[in-house]
Image (tube, grey):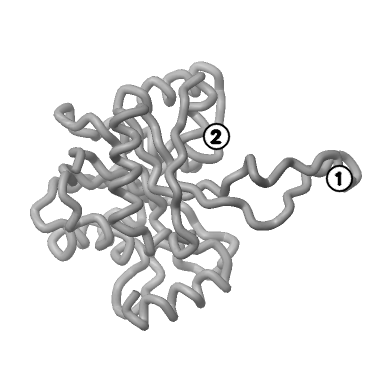
Amino acid sequence: MENFSLIIPAAGRGARIGGPIPKPFIEIGGKTILEHTLSRFTGAEGLQQIIIATSGEWVERVQAMEERLTEGIPFHVAEGGEERQSSVKNALSEVLDAVDLVVVHDAVRPFVSLDILIRCLNAAAEYGAAISGIPVKDTIKRIGDGGYVVETPDRHELIQAQTPQVFSKRVLRDAFHHASLNDFIGTDDASLVEFAGGGVKVVRGAEENFKITWPSDLAMARKLLTDGF
């Protein structure tokens, strides 16, 4: 497997779920969602470094995870920003010089498989950038002013993007620099590479690799993690 650094942005507040605790720090079965997510990577061959970007009030909580989860892998906590993009940018400055590939993965996507990670790493090593994604099942409508439908894109040309998203370190740093120069804010890291004119290879993801966004997602995650997924 390719050598890589892992960046996990964990500074979000999780407003759509509600409650006083940010989503990454909600506990399920005695571990936070962030810890469940990290556990999917710590045994992966090629992992050289873990960087968690989080907000100031949760830094000590994240640092306490090092001994329990990292198995001697170099571990850094970076300052999280108001936007995900700022968090990843701060974490990117901590990536080891010797590492060529950078994996960015959502803190609240704890069901990623090793198979998806390996295929994304291999694709990024070949093409410079790769993301996991799944086909869109529903018909998608684009709406305009007044809430009227203006277009129905061909769903066979659409995917639902997931993480991990994997990049050559040079490609990702160049994309962030280009975005900064142009005041561009993307919805994910791949969109910065696209904005800079780079190509992004899509690797087939999995439906079970879902992101915990809504209360129903949290309920499903509790069931799966309690059942030992």
User: Which kind of residue does numbered mark 2 sit on?
Assistant: Gly
Residue lying furthest left in this view? Answer: 72
Other-residue count near label 1 (Cα within 10 Å), few / some / many at <14 / 14–19 / ≥20: few
Label 1 or label 2, whichever comes before in sequence order: 1
Q: Return the x and y of residue 7 as percentages of the image width and height.
A: 31, 44
Figure check: 214 above or below 173? below
The residue labelled by disc 1 is: 149
Q: Which residue is the site of mark 2?
A: 186
Number of marks in the rendered image: 2
Dots 1 and 2: beta carbons under 8 Å? Answer: no
Examine the rendering and report whether any part of residue 55 can be seen.
no
Q: Nearer the viewer, residue 134 or 143?
A: 134
Q: Nearer the viewer, mark 1 or mark 2?
A: 1
Q: Residue at x 33, y 69 (%)?
A: 32
Label 1, label 2: how far apart the Cα atoms are: 24 Å
Location of the N terminus (image quadrant): top left
Badge 1 marks a residue whose secondary structure is strand
- The x and y percentages for residue 71 are 11, 58
Q: Is residue 76 visible?
A: yes
The answer to whether 56 appears left or right of 5 in the picture is: right
Image coordinates for residue 202, horizontal then vertical, percent: 46, 39
Quadrant in which residue 229 is drawn: bottom left
Sort mark 2 into few (<14), some (14-19) or many (20+) by Cα contacts within 10 Å. some
Where on the picture, by quarter, is residue 57? bottom left
- Identity of the amino acid at label 1? Val
From what the image shows, is residue 22 above or below residue 156?
Answer: below
Q: In percent of the image, x 56 and y 23: which residue is there?
A: 183
Does 193 sit above or below residue 33?
above
Quick check: 168 above or below 75? above
